[in-house]
Amino acid sequence: MKLFEGSNERLKRISYHGKEIILANYSGLKEEEMIELTNQHRDLVLHEGKESFFIANYENTWGTPGYMKAAHDFTQATKPFIKRGAFLGINGPKVALLKGVTYFLKVDFRSFNNEQDALDFLVS
């Protein structure tokens, strides 16, 4: 399954095994664009005010201090609604950042090497 190919949409929804999943495609974005997408995702989750799941694609991105602040704020604001989150493209130093976020904020966010494993985690 190619969730992020063939679409210019940065934020979209899919249905998988009866669960609605938000796809956030950060691939190739710069800091300002990443922050904007994070804020759009946050606003969507808060506006709906219901259980939410997501897959975020971080291929070819950098976790800048400005973006990490926005990601922290997103996680704090949406924690009551987001039950699980899956990440693609997390490698190298980004692995440590994700582990720190999940540990300190006590959220169920995990990194995966492929889309199928990420989907299966979200609906398990």
Image (tube, grey):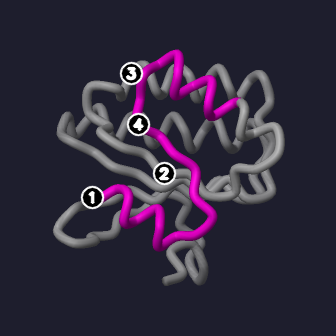
Q: Which residue is mark 4?
A: 108
Q: Which residue is mark 1?
A: 124
CA distance for labels 1 and 3 = 24 Å
- In the rendered image, the vertical position of residue 94 relative to residue 73, given as above or below: below
The reply to whether discs 4 and 3 touch (Cβ–Cβ < 8 Å) is no
Residue depicted at 73% across the width and 37% down the height = 32
Front label number (1 vs 3): 1
68 or 33: which is nearer to us? 68
The C terminus, quarter of image: bottom left
Front label number (2 vs 1): 1
Tell me the kind of residue under disc 2.
Answer: Ala
Front label number (4 vs 3): 4
Number of the label disc, if any, that sits on residue 86? 2
Find the magenta span and give its range: 97-124
Residue 82 falls in image quadrant: top left
CA distance for labels 4 and 3 = 15 Å
Q: Which residue is mark 3?
A: 77
Who comes first in sequence, dot 4 or dot 2?
Answer: 2
Who comes first in sequence, dot 2 or dot 1?
Answer: 2
